[in-house]
Every structure is written in C-alpha cells, then in structure tokens.
Image: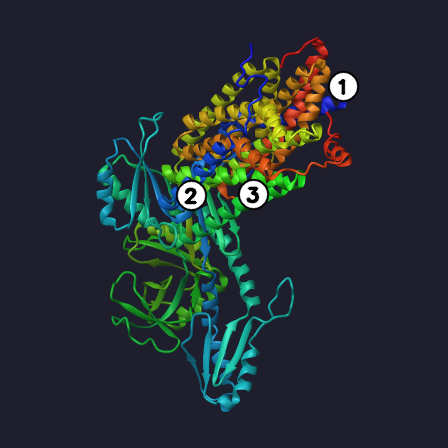
C-alpha cells in the first residue's frame, strides 16, 4: 500500500470560500506591514553596521556579568544574546553586538572586549568576530533591495513571456504576498535579519514561483482542452489535478529543511526558518493567491490552434 | 515508443560516471588535501619522506580536484579594506611646491615674488606679486604638466592650471587621478600580498574589489588582530636631516621644514626638513636584531642607490643629527658619528621584540602608497567552522535518507528510480563544484539540502502525470511516455524561474550568499538532467526487462 498524502481523486472547490481565503491573505499582509512598521526588523550588522562577537565559554553565561564587564569600555549600545542549541548543551554561546563605528572594529577594541570578558570567565573565547562599517552596510542594503526587486522583475518578465500577462500578475502577487508575510514573521519574532535572510527570501521567491508555474502550466493546458468550460471550473480542475504533486514536493522539501533546522546548527537556523516559512506560505499562495487573482482577472480564451501547437511543441525536440 | 538509442544511453551513463568520478576526491577530503599540499611543496623544492608519503596516499591517476571550503566552514579571516586614494593626490600636489616655486622664480623679474596660500587638500594655490604677468606665469606652470598615458590615449595632461586675479590654482586632472588610482591599487595589492606573506599563512586570497577596495581572505587564521595591525600601518620610513630639537609643539618650523613628534620622548619635537635623504623604498632588507647595549633594534640594508645617497650624506654631515621617521613620527634622532659606507645600519628605539619583528616585516614588504581602512571584517574560528561542517553533514545525510524513504513509501519501485537519480544528483553537484573550483559555504550546504528536497520535484511531476495517464486507462508504455512528454513544459518553466533567482543571487551576492546561489543553481541543472534523462533511462531499462502488463506508480 502506498503512502498517499492526497487522495488519488480530488475535486475540492478552492474558490467557494474566496472571500475567506482572500480576506485571510489580506489580513495577514496588513498585519505584517503593521508589525514591520511598529516593531521593525531586527537588522543584523550586515544592514545596520556594527560588530558582533560570538563567544563560547566553559561556564554558564551570566548576561549581567558580561554587561557589567563591558560597561567601562564605553562601546555605546550593546546587546548580549544567549544562543542556545539543545543539541550542544556543553556550549555557552553568546552573541554580543556593539554599535557601528566609522569603519570595521579596531584590533584594539576586539582585544579590549576579549580582555574584559575573560575577566568574567577566563575560559571565554571568540568563535567569530564580524564587523561591518556603515559605508559597506549601506551598500549591502542597496544590493539586497535591488536583488529582490530584480528577481521579482525577471520572473515577472519570464512568465509574461511564457504565459499571458494575467498569469504574470497573479504569480507576482503571490510572490509579494509571500515575501511580505515572511518579513512580517521576522518582525514579530525579532529574528536577526541579515544578508543570508535575503538569500532565503529570494529562494522563497523561486520556490513559490516553481509551485505557481506548475499550476499555471496545467491551467494553460486545460484551457486549451476544455474551451467551453468556465475559467473558475478550469482553475479548480487544474489545482485538483496538480494537488498531489504540490503536496508531495512541499513535503519532501520540508523534510529536508526541517532536518537542517534541527541538526544544522544555530548559525544557519534563522536562514532555514525563513525558508520553511516560505515553503509553507508559498504553497498556500500558489493556490489561494496566484490562482485566485487569475480567476478575478480572467484570461483571454481565443487560443488559436497555431499558437497552441507552437507552445506545446516548443520542447518536443527535447527527447531522451 | 520508449526506445532510447544506444549512443544516448552511453552518453547519459558516461556523464553520470564522469560527475561521480570528479566528486570522488571529496569523499576522502583530508587525504586528498594533504596530497595536493604535498605535491605543491615538492614542486617548490621541499622533499621530505613525510611529503612523499602524503603524495603516495592518493593515487595520482585519480582526480584530485576538491570543493573549496569557504571561510565560514574552515575558519579564517575575511577583511575588506578601503584604500584612501585621495591621500595620494594630496601628497602629489604637496610635493610639487618646490618645483612650481623654482620654475616661477626663473622669471622673477616679470612675475615677482611667489607665495603659497592655504588651500583645501589636493589643491595648490599660489599668489604671484605681479598680477599683470599672470598669463606668463600660467604658461610657465603649464610647462610642468606631463601627458597622461592612458589606454584611451586622449592626450590629456596631468595638471589643471587656472588663474584668477593674482592666484594660480593647480589641481590634478581627472585623467591623472584615474591613472594614479590604478597605480596606487596595483602597488597596494602588491604590498598587501607581501605583508600577508610575511605572516606566513597558507593560500591567502588578495583581490581588488571595485575601484578602491582590497579583499583579503586568509583561511585558518583564528584572529584578525595581527593581520589588521599589519594593514593598519603605512610603514613609510624616511631618513631626514634634523634642523633642531624643541619642546614646543607649536613652534614655527620655517619654510620647507615640518615639526614631528618623537615616539619615545613625549613632549619632545623635532623640526626636520620635508625632503628625505633616503626612504624605505630603497631598503632591500630589514631584520630584528639587538644593539650593543642589548636593546631591541631593527637592522637594515639599502640598495646600491640608497647606500650611495646615505653614504654621501653621512660623509658630509658628520656631527649633525638626522631623524629616522616612521609614518610621521620620529623613532630616533642619532648623531652621525662617522661616514656610514656600505649602506647598512640599525634603528634603535624603545622596541619590544614583537615590535621589532613587525617593523622589520613591514619594512621588507614596503610602504603602502595610501592608508588602508578596514571596512568589513568577518573572522570565523576554525572550531566554529568545524562544527558547522559537522552539523551540515549530519543534516544532509538525515535529509537525504528521509527523502529516500519518503519517495519509496509514496511511489514504490518508481520511488527507487527517483532515488537512484537523487543519489547521482548529489554526486553530480559535488563533481561540478570540484570541477569549477567553486567554494562551498554554510548557506551552500543549505542549498544542497534544499536541492535534495526540490530535486525530486521533477520526478514527482512526471510520476503524477504517469498516474493520471494510467487512470485514463492507457497502457503502461504509453502512460510512461505521455507522462514524460506532458510533464516536460512544467518542469522546464518551473526550473527556469528558480534558476533565474539563483542567477540573480549569484550576480548580486557576495561570499556566503554567492555560495548558496552556486549550489542552488548547479542543483537545478543536475536535477533537471537526472529527472529527464537518468530516471527516464532507468525506467526504460526496467521496462524493457520486465515488460509489465500493469504498472503501479
């Protein structure tokens, strides 16, 4: 007997509760924007500049002692966060962030911080020191924004090229939806938002699209097959037909990501969390956002036979 | 129907075998790494039995390309430093005063006296006494301009000279600035390389980034402090005649002189001539040593030209003091006891042993043409890197096994076929990474794990299609064929869009993000290849053998 996550024959109506799902998405997005405006993102030093020291010691961390030790150094706004990894109980890791200076952290500052902390716990050592000057962090912000915008624009263009503009709009709406909600979640949970998270966001963009495109591909095929059926009906049919695949792929991807989240160490956990979130939201949005928008916009149905043949025959020469 | 010509089968298997062959060394990472290091060491002339043993530990007929580990995995220091290019313009303009003055003085009768005015750094303003002779004065100053040699060869000169009233303004032309920037950057890279080599670490990366930055990556280093101290010093050494010694820091040095603080005696200043007798550029060697009183010192040796200048100067100025100036501070100001021939000597001061070692290393490496400012630092301790590799590896293996099991549970025999493709897929990723010499980072490992999850997507698409075709009562062979055919456009579209995002990440990202983009992008290529060629071939071979009347997917 096979493991079947989705019954082999389904005929769910994905649009009958359009107001509910659409409303849910809108509320989530609005909440994300509000959260972002109110709480803001916990930007890492990549984007705000500054220095982080990752410390590890043999004895348990007492944040107050660390703080007291650093106080006389006059480093400005200092944050000390204890990083715990249940799989590595022997580690006593903290992440200490100090304010941005004119350039990267001076060798003397690093030495002074290490000295002060070793006064508290002599087994303490630095596992990593990262420092970004304000000029570089400004550039990184620019690059990050540019990357996300460029990625969205590029795929918008590609989908418009391969499908119709309504498809492209639906796909991009789904992308924006995913990215906004992920950013909202990062604001809510105050997880460090750095360059790696941008990479995760772009991967979410890629994944969400992947999902959307598979559904759209089936929609396009069914629109040609069932020329007289209503668009809503065709959309529903297409989503149902691809549902098993959508769930399968999401599950395998999630299996891989969750194992990385649990076992991959704390350095990468935020990054993986963003992707897990993105896969879940991306799967949801390809059905309830991309297709719903397509349903609203309508599609031009006069696929001429020539055009149809041309598109479906485009890859016919790839044969193995 | 399901015929695949022999040449295609051979090609597909050959590509898979090639990829796995290239990936093989990574399975024996430490052995191969030591083999490679030993081969290089032997080529450079060091032959020891240990090295030979390391070489022999990995057969030479096997490939030896490895995936490079990024700094976040092996530990090390990453520094991005900005070169203060404007410094060189200022120095250049400041250094022109004597020439400008002497040139204008040749026609003193016409132009009258000349005087330098205060101006912003990088600009020289000169007032002439006789305003009417301005055009002649400009003409004279313009004769000093040299053509700038550029690739464009527009024939521009290096100076921009303009007159306003009785003031001549001299600045560097943009073409000259650009040419100077190039020279400064080349020189800086060279000197940084020398200095980092002095630290004696293995395989540092020193690259130019953009117009005014230098990227320095040194794997295996646990702390950036030593490196930053090396880069933070310009190390400009000069031997200058001393005019007098004073305790008044605001004393007027007089024209052509400047006042510099003493390093060892706070509150003491030396008024020295601006022009140096000899500079650090003419040194050929410097070593830490001990002076006759047992104090720490640095010995140095000049090249032929430097030795002659130094010899001549000391012969003419016996009894006079001269200052040894390092980066604008007087280290010591000994009195010349005798003619120093041969061009060697020692610098004494209140040094510690570490300081003499560092100073001599800096002097050997040469002075930086402009100040370097570190704008980004990322130092990862080797332990954290090792932890990350371990964690990444375990996560990869667990993800891999979980996906394999899940696929078999969901698709039975066909799930096994997809798994064969998945295993080959991961092998191919490592093969390609080794082949192009890409760098694997921690996010890169995440990219591989993500690929493991997503790689089955293409197969899932195909298998689901085959299921649908079977439901539509098609025969097994026809169902398989249609499944592949119809799933193709979805596979291509879905993967191209993901590939576009990977490409953009690669183009815009740096370091770890780039590493992620590389594994993600390669993963997409290999997973499409394995899904539409490898699994298909496996399915066809299985079908030919079994000829099943009915199939279950």
Report the number of discs: 3
A70 lies above or below A239: below
Report the chain holding disc 2.
A
Question: CA separation, marks 2 and 3?
Answer: 21 Å
Q: Is residue B164 visible?
A: yes
SS state under label 3: helix
SS state under label 1: loop
Q: Residues within 10 Å of mark 2 (few under 14, many from 20)?
A: some
Disc 3 target residue? A151
Asked if marks 2 and 3 touch (Cβ < 8 Å), the reply is no
Question: Toward the viewer: B198 or A216?
Answer: A216
Disc 1 target residue? B3
Report the chain holding disc 3.
A
Residue B351, how many percent across, how many down? 30, 54
Locate residue B243 relative to residue B155 in the image: left or right. left
Q: Residues within 10 Å of mark 1 (few under 14, many from 20)?
A: few
Residue B146, how many percent across, how many down? 58, 72
Disc 2 target residue? A33
């Amino acid at each position: 007997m096979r493991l079947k996550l989705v019954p082999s024959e389904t005929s769910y109506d994905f649009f009958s509760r359009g107001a509910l799902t659409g409303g849910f998405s809108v509320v989530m997005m609005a909440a994300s924007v509000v959260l972002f405006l109110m709480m803001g993102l916990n930007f890492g030093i990549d984007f705000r500049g500054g220095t982080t020291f990752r410390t590890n010691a043999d004895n348990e961390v007492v944040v107050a002692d660390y703080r007291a030790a650093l106080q006389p150094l006059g480093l400005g706004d200092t944050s000390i966060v204890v990083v715990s990894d249940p799989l590595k109980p022997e580690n006593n890791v903290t992440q200490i962030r100090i304010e941005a200076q004119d350039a990267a952290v001076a060798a003397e500052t690093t030495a002074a911080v290490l000295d002060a902390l070793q006064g508290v716990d002599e087994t303490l050592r630095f596992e990593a020191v990262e420092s970004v000057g304000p000029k570089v962090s400004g550039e990184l912000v620019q690059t990050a924004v540019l990357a996300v915008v460029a990625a969205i624009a590029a795929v918008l263009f590609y989908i418009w090229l391969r499908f119709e503009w309504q498809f492209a709009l639906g796909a991009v709406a789904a992308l924006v939806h995913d990215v906004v909600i992920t950013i909202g979640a990062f604001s809510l949970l105050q997880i460090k938002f750095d360059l790696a998270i941008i990479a995760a966001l772009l991967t979410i963009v890629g994944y969400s699209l992947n999902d959307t495109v598979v559904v759209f591909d089936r929609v396009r095929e069914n629109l040609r097959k069932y020329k007289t059926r209503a668009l809503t009906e065709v959309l529903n049919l297409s989503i149902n037909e691809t549902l098993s695949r959508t769930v399968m792929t999401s599950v395998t991807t999630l299996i891989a990501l969750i194992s990385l989240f649990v076992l991959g160490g704390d350095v990468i956990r935020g990054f993986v969390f963003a992707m897990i979130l993105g896969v879940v939201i991306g799967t949801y949005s390809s059905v309830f956002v991309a297709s719903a928008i397509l349903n609203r916009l309508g599609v031009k149905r006069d696929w001429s036979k020539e055009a149809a043949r041309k598109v479906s025959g485009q890859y016919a020469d790839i044969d193995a | 129907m399901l015929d695949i010509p022999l040449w295609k089968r051979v090609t597909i298997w050959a590509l898979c075998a090639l990829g796995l062959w290239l990936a093989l060394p990574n399975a024996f990472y430490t052995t191969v790494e030591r083999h490679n290091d030993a081969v290089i060491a032997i080529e450079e002339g060091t032959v020891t039995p240990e090295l030979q043993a390391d070489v022999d530990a990995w057969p030479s007929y096997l490939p030896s390309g490895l995936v490079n580990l990024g700094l976040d995995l092996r530990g090390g220091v990453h520094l991005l430093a900005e070169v203060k290019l404007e410094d060189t313009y200022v120095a250049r303009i400041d250094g022109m005063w004597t020439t400008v003055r002497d040139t204008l003085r040749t026609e003193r009768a016409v132009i009258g006296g000349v005087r330098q005015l205060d101006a912003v750094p990088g600009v020289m303003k000169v007032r002439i006494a006789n305003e009417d002779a301005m055009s002649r004065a400009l003409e004279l100053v313009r004769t000093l301009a040299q053509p700038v040699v550029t690739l464009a060869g527009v024939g521009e000169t290096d100076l921009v000279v303009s007159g306003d009233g009785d003031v001549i303004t001299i600045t560097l032309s943009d073409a000259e600035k650009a040419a100077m920037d190039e020279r400064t950057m080349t020189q800086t890279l060279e000197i940084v390389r020398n200095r980092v080599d002095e630290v004696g670490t293995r395989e540092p990366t020193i690259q130019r980034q953009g117009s005014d930055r230098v990227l320095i990556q040194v794997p295996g280093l646990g702390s950036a402090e030593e490196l930053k101290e090396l880069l933070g010093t310009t190390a400009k050494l000069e031997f200058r005649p001393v005019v007098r010694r004073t305790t008044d820091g605001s004393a007027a040095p007089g024209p052509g002189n400047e006042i510099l603080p003493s390093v060892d005696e706070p509150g003491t200043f030396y008024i020295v001539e601006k022009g140096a007798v000899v500079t650090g550029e003419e040194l050929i060697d410097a070593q830490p040593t001990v002076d006759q009183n047992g104090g720490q010192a640095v010995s140095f040796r000049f090249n032929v030209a430097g030795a002659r200048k130094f010899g001549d100067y000391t012969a003419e100025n016996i009894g006079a003091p001269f200052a040894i100036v390092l980066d604008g501070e007087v280290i010591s100001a000994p009195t010349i006891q005798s003619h120093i021939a041969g061009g060697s000597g020692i610098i004494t001061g209140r040094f510690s042993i570490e300081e003499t070692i560092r100073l001599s290393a800096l002097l050997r490496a040469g002075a930086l043409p402009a100040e370097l400012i570190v704008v980004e630092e990322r130092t990862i301790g080797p332990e954290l890197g090792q932890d990350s590799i371990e964690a990444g590896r375990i996560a990869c293996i667990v993800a891999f096994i979980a996906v394999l099991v899940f696929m078999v549970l969901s698709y039975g025999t066909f799930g096994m076929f997809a798994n064969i493709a998945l295993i080959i897929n991961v092998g191919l990723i490592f093969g390609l990474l080794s082949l192009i010499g890409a760098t694997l980072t921690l996010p890169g490992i995440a990219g591989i794990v993500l690929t493991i999850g997503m790689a089955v997507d293409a197969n899932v698409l195909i298998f689901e299609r085959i299921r649908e075709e079977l439901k539509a009562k098609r025969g097994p062979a026809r169902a398989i064929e249609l499944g592949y055919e119809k799933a193709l456009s979805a596979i291509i579209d879905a993967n191209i869009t993901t590939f576009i995002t990977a490409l953009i990440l690669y183009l815009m990202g740096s370091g770890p993000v780039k590493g992620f983009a590389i594994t993600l992008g390669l993963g997409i290529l290999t997973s499409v290849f394995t899904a539409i060629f490898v699994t298909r071939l496996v399915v066809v071979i299985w079908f030919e053998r079994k000829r099943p009347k009915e199939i279950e997917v």
